[in-house]
Image: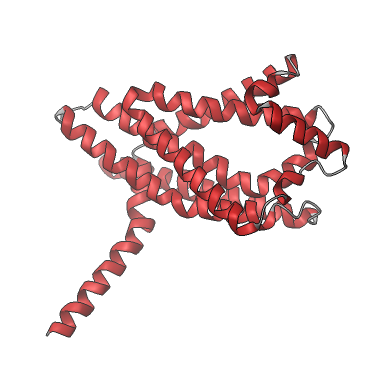
C-alpha cells in the first residue's frame, strides 16, 4: 500500500510537471495576449528609438553602453575581430554569469510591475534602447550583417525572453489597477502567481540562451546555414510556444463561449 501511494504521488508530480509546461503556461499567456502585444510593441519602438538616437549622435553609444565597452569594441574592430568580446572569458564562467544576469533582469522586469506598467515599461525601454544603439553602432562600421548573424545566435532567445518577462510585470501592475470583480488584494495575489509562473517558464529559455552565448556565439566564423538554423529555430520556438499556442487557446475558448 505504501509503495502504491509513493508511486501514485510520483506519477501525479510527474504529470503536474508536464501539464505545467504543456497546458498551464500557454493558458496563462492566452489570457495575457494584450500585455504580450504591448511588451513586443514597446520593445520594438524603443529599439527604433535607440537606432535613430545613435544615428543622429555617434556619442550616444558611449552614454548607453559606456566608454569602456565602446572603446573595447572599436579596438576589436580595428584588430579585425569585432565580436571578440564573446571569446574573452571561459565558457563556464560566461554561462553562469550571463544566465544569472538575464534571470535577474527578468525578475526586475516583473517586480517593477509594482509601480504599474510604467515601472516594467521603463526597464524594457532601457534594454530596448541599448539593443537599438548596439545595432546601429555596428551598422556604422558596415558590420551589421556580421554582427546580427553572430549576436542573434543567442539573442533570439535572450531578447525574446526579456521582452516576454515584461508581460509578467504588466500582469502584476494591471492586476491591482484593474481588479475586476475581485478584491484588489486577491487580484494582486493572482497577478503575482501568474507572473511568477511566467518567469519560471522563461528560466529554461535563459539557460539555453546562456549556453548559446557562452559556448556557441564565440565561433564567429560559423557557417551561415548553421547560424540561420539556430536563429530561426529559436524564433520559431518563441513564436510557437508564447504566441501561436496561447492564441489558439484563446480562440478556442472564445469559440466555445459563443456556442
Q: Residue at left 41%, top 39%?
A: 107
Query: Which x, y percent locates residue 37?
Result: 46, 31
Q: Quadrant of residue 148?
A: top right
Identify which residue is drawn at 73% across, 47% down: 150
Q: Nearer the viewer, residue 217 or 62?
A: 62
Furthest residue toward left: 1
Query: Residue 161 vs residue 141: left or right?
Result: left
Could you tell whether 48 is left or right of 116 in the image? right
Task: Kindly tell me whether residue 19 is visible in this rendering.
Answer: yes
Is residue 244 rendered to the left or right of residue 231? left
The quadrant of the rendering that contains the C terminus is top left
Relative to the observer, which residue lies in front, 111 or 92? Answer: 92
The relative height of residue 5 versus residue 143 in the rendered view (above or below) is below
Number of callouts? 0
Looking at the image, can residue 252 be seen? Answer: no
| 233 vs 90, nearest the viewer | 90
Residue drawn at (78%, 56%) of the image = 222
Left or right placement of residue 29 versus residue 50 in this view:
left
x and y percent of residue 11 in the render? 26, 73
* Residue lying furthest top: 56
Closest to the observer: 184 or 122? 122
Colouring rule applied to residues: secondary structure
Measuring from the top left, give residue 175's x and y in whole percent: 27, 30
Provide residue 58's location: percent of width, then percent of height: 76, 19
- What residue is shown at x 74% (from left), y 19% (from top)? 55
Quadrant of the frame with the N terminus: bottom left
Amino acid at each position: 500500500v505504501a509503495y502504491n501511494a509513493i508511486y501514485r504521488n510520483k506519477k501525479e508530480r510527474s504529470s503536474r510537471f508536464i501539464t505545467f509546461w504543456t497546458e498551464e503556461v500557454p493558458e496563462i499567456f492566452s489570457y495575457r495576449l494584450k500585455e504580450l502585444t504591448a511588451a513586443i510593441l514597446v520593445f520594438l519602438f524603443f529599439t527604433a528609438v535607440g537606432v535613430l538616437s545613435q544615428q543622429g549622435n555617434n556619442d550616444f553609444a558611449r552614454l548607453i553602453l559606456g566608454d569602456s565597452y565602446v572603446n573595447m569594441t572599436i579596438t576589436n574592430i580595428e584588430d579585425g575581430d569585432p565580436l571578440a568580446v564573446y571569446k574573452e572569458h571561459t565558457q563556464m564562467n560566461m554561462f553562469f554569469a550571463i544566465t544569472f544576469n538575464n534571470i535577474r533582469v527578468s525578475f526586475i522586469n516583473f517586480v517593477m510591475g509594482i509601480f504599474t506598467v510604467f515601472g516594467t515599461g521603463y526597464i524594457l525601454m532601457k534594454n530596448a534602447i541599448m539593443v537599438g544603439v548596439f545595432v546601429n553602432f555596428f551598422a556604422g562600421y558596415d558590420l551589421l550583417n556580421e554582427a546580427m548573424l553572430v549576436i542573434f545566435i543567442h539573442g533570439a532567445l535572450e531578447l525574446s525572453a526579456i521582452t516576454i518577462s515584461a508581460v509578467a510585470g504588466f500582469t502584476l501592475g494591471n492586476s491591482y489597477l484593474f481588479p475586476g470583480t475581485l478584491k484588489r488584494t486577491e487580484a494582486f495575489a493572482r497577478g503575482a502567481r501568474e507572473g511568477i509562473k511566467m518567469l519560471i517558464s522563461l528560466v529554461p529559455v535563459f539557460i539555453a540562451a546562456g549556453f548559446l552565448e557562452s559556448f556557441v556565439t564565440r565561433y564567429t566564423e560559423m557557417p551561415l546555414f548553421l547560424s540561420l538554423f539556430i536563429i530561426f529555430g529559436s524564433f520559431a520556438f518563441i513564436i510557437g510556444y508564447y504566441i501561436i499556442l496561447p492564441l489558439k487557446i484563446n480562440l478556442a475558448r472564445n469559440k466555445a463561449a459563443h456556442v
